[in-house]
Amino acid sequence: MTDHSNTQLLWTLTKGFRSTYAAAIGAMATGYLCLFSAPMLAKFSIDAIIEGDNFSPPMWLTRLIHWLPIKAESDIFPYLIAISISTLLLTLLSGLCLFLRGRFVAIASEGITRLFRDRLFNHLEHLPSSFHDSADTGDLVQRCTSDLENVRIFMASQVMEIARVSLIVLLVLPILFTLDANMAWLSLLSLPLLLLSSIAFFQRVKSRFLLVDQAEACMTSILQENLTGIRVVKAYARQDFEIEKFSSANADFRDQNTRLLGLIGIFYGFSDLICLTQIGILLLAGSLWVIAGSLTIGTLFAFLTYESIIIWPIRHLGRVLTDSGKAIVSIDRLSELLLEPRESELQISSPEALAPKRLQGGIVIEQLTFGYQPNNPVLENLSLNLDAGQTLAILGGPGSGKSTLCLLLMRLYDYPKGSITLGGEELSSLDRKHVRSQISIVPQEPFLYATSILNNIKIGNLHADQQAVEKAARQANIHSAIMSFPMGYHTIVGERGMTLSGGQRQRLALARALLKSPPVIILDDALSAVDTQTEASILDALKENCRRLNQTTLIIAHRLSTVMHADKIIVLNKGKIAQSGNHESLANQPGIYQKLCEIQAIPSFQSYPPQLAVGS
Amino acid sequence: MSEFFDTETPTQNLDEDTFDQGVDLHLWRKLLGYALNYPADVIMLSICAIVTAISEIAFPLITRQVIDKISEQGAAIDIMHYGSLYLIFVVVLATSVAGFIWFGGRIRTQVSYDIRQDGFKNLQQLSFSYYDFRPVGWLMARMTSDCERLSNILAWGLLDIIWCSTMILGITAAMIYMNTKLALIILAVLPFLAVLSIFFQRHIIKSARKVRKTNSKITGYFNESIMGVKTTKAFVQEQNNLSQFSHLTGAMYHASVLNRVQAALYLPLVLILGAIAAGLALVFGGMEVIWGTITAGTLIAFLTYSRHFFEPIEELARWFAEMQMAQASAERILGLIDAKPAISDSTLVTTNIRTHERHLECPAFAASASTAALDGLPLTISRIEFRQVCFSYPNGPRVLDNINLTIQRGDTIAIVGTSGGGKTSLINLLCRFYEPSAGNILLDNIDYRNRSLSWLQSNLGMVLQTSHIFRGSILDNIRYGNLSANTTEIKMAARRAGADIFIQQMEYGYSTEVGEGGAKLSAGEKQLISIARAILANPQILILDEATSSIDLMTEETIQHGLAELFQNRISLVIAHRLSTVRNANTILVVEKGKIVQRGNHTQLLKMGGRYQQLYQQQNASQTTQQEKLWVSA
């Protein structure tokens, strides 16, 4: 990333809000102009009071008094009334301007943030799976939240703060030099020192802020881990160990924070010393000039007021500039994310404009080779033919390529070699979303959204009515469990909701997949946490679906009871098909499948004659 | 797209902030106790706050004197005198400002540390029933943002309240001292300012909370969309998710703009009130100067004070509103700290533990005492008995009904049955995560409620279906079973669990970092590590709850020997759906609808017919013919 493209990103982001920003700055300038006139008016009144008859009012003041219906008790009184009223009017005007500034900035900065947020979200959803595999969830969430927040603060306050300080300097300096050049030079005396020390300080503590953030993140993750694993902690009675682990992280967070606050305390004490000394010097030097007769008391008062208007924002500027630096880094991180190519940009062959019609469920795989890293193939030279309506069972140990095959079928990854066709169409020639709408997948550890059970099932088909949802739930054998919850289908699940057991989650995901009723359905070890009896009735329902909808079913499982009724069974070993056939043929041929049969059932027959086991 | 979605679901009100109640003093007194644990810091903070306020009040008075001096025509001024006076106050002020940030910071961080520490310690003691109704995210929010919020109030709120009160009192006193009439005129603006401030601060804080809440929802949504990206893609939900997300960002936009506009409205109103006060001071004060009742210096001091008056009142109003809003946080976190565990050691047990400790110190008893458990009773568990045990979860239906069961040391008990039949509840009772609603569980004829809870639980080894893996290396994760184990012992345990092979294949072997929640491991690998952890723990009671469900059959077969060895010399309970896993148990219990409907070993149960045979056939069904052939050929 170059700084140039960062600025460009920032500039494109402000599109549609630039005039709002301009209006905000205009309102601020007008507002401050009014506000800064107030000390001038106070100067006139003080001079009028002290100098009495010697006071020579400016033209506008005489005219204003002329307009006002005041009966003068003394010569000065009308001046005072006039000045008070004009101060009030100016303040009203500046109040209005400042309100407008606030409103414009809020609309602009929040509007930009909103668009930026939507854009990021949309982008994330469309990034390819390979990106999400290698990305760290915590890091992505942090970019989308804290980094975006840094940009928001930059847009909302730092930009305006920098504009404000520039405005103050631009508006106040001419006033000061018109009033008295000597005093003006004097009042600028400590400003460079103040500004430099402020910038230097906040640059230095930047790393401290980072340490505090890290300590907090560390403490939070230990807490999170402890709370999610509280069963294990209790089962091993590791409370003391956990408390010790947490205490040290908690103490580290405290100490880092204390140290940072201590430094900030020293800085504020020190800068207060500079600021107040500056005001003191102005007061005493001004007094000498007043005695010498070259300065009026009113002007001295005006200088004291202007000094405090200008000095505190300058002290604050170091902080503002440092935070802007943070925002620049954040924009860097965000544009890095936005530059990641979307899935649709990764198309290998060009998509033919196909109407997203329903495909037939027949699957033909030829010479398929795929690996996550180029020289480490997970699937090698795989060929396979499955008719629509057939059931295929896939067996294999960890790392044999079972799940990868499912991911390729979903086009969650692209295959560089070989071919996969679905209903006669080459997958890579179809639109990804089209492919996915033709296939339902139930993963082993299904993901549930933090919403109601109903909504979670309806993800399969948003237009389904309650009846259809319940039918799918019955087929997945989860309906009665759902009805036993007090809120039924409206029970919230996911992070902030009710905890479901592994089997319940799997069945819920199955209901979701069934509701979609696509040509192809994939169960990726999706019944591992379901007991055998329930499994049997689910498999029956699936079979019935297959017949009715001519649905092709792929089942990955470890239990033989799950796979043995399949039309076709393949055993994968290190990315290759080691065996294929149906239950009967495989059980009779020596190999992995036969061994599995032995493990699961045969030893039990050793203890008594086989006929007993038939259960007659 | 939202019209397709379920809208009947009520939103949870677990963390709603309200203004309904006034400030509950009792609650805050209790919280203040956390700050008062550091009396020296609190006193220094108060002193710094008061000194800061007094110095700030002093500056306009010095300026007044200087101006009075110079407005007397032709008078000389003692620059050294005023210069040094001014300088003294500057140094005092700068020191006290640094001081209050320093001491406030100490209180702030120390208090948040203490609250969090108390909360964490109590969370470790609380029973499972506490966790059943409180999601992890909810607990996290109490322990992080609530803690920070309260400690902010206790440090900076305390500071500001002292500073503001001193400022208001001090300025009032200084003004009355200079001129009562003018003071009263300016003070007349005060009630308006107070009402305005309280009104606005309330609304500003309220809308800020809404912003924060919406923001945390957005974070949750981002998190969800990233975690569930594959599901989203598989169901082509991108567009639908985006439209829901846009609703949220729209709500965020409106809430934020409202909040900022409220603040933008408040500031000018305060400025205008200030201008009115200054105008009054100018008109009335100006005349007084002309009449000679007050000096020009006094007028300027009044003008300055009329500006300084506003900040403390704004701040006070803000803290008052914040305290009202934070009350719900305070209640929640104190509730968490004060929550009593539903299950804890009885008084009898605590007395036993104390007696035992005394015995250990006394040489006469030490020898015999050292062979006993920490409650003075036998160390070993050789028999567990369930006697007419019934159980139901709070406000729930009966889950276990009249369970009678005896398990001897060396026994392996397998529990099978349909989901929801009560298998896991049985285990939860045995581990004393819950206690029976009726009946007793006896450990060697002593009711386990009369034994130490932590003694029992430190003798458990547990492998669950969803294995929890901690961030850190594989080595550390296995070591969790026995913190004092060395690397050789850990590797031995891994070998027996069948985990050694895949660990060796990993790039860094045993030192491989597994990531948050073991993200880099498959479900089966996580289970193998959990089994290794249990083996290393060498517990008296071992529980495998669907511990091998994600492990493929070949691997399970290879670890069967390790498990068989593991089951020796202890009490083992196994829950499994795969019957191949439970075949070798001494006793198999078939649990259905909270009752043990069948018991016996595999052979007996098959002969007996009924539920077990049914389950068995479902798994093997049409296999038998081929198996017979195989069997004959083998």
Image (cartoon, helix red, strand yellow):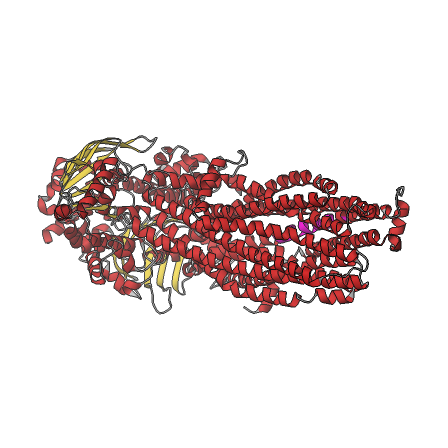
Determine whether, in the image, residue A415 is placed left or right of residue A269. Answer: left
Instruction: Tell me which residue sits at (72%, 54%) in the image.
Output: B65
Determine whether, in the image, residue A362 is placed left or right of residue B159. Answer: left
Res A373 quadrant in image: bottom left
Instruction: Tell me which residue sits at (44%, 51%) in the image.
Output: B110
Can residue B505 be seen from the camera position used here? Answer: yes
Instruction: Choose between B58 and B159: the one closer to the eye.
Output: B58
For the stretch drawn in magenta, what is the main secondary structure?
helix
Instruction: Choose between A485 and A576: the one closer to the eye.
Output: A485
Tell me: residue A441, above or below residue B29: below
Can residue A122 be seen from the camera position used here? Answer: no
Determine whether, in the image, residue A568 is placed left or right of residue B211. Answer: left
Instruction: Give the extent of the magenta segment.
Output: A93-109
Instruction: Tell me which residue sits at (43%, 34%) in the image.
Output: A467
Which quadrant holds the C terminus of chain B? Answer: bottom left
Does residue A574 show up magenta in the picture? no
Instruction: Tell me which residue sits at (52%, 63%) in the image.
Output: A206
Q: Position of residue B47 (x, y in %)?
A: 54, 50
Q: Position of residue A143 (x, y in %)?
A: 50, 58
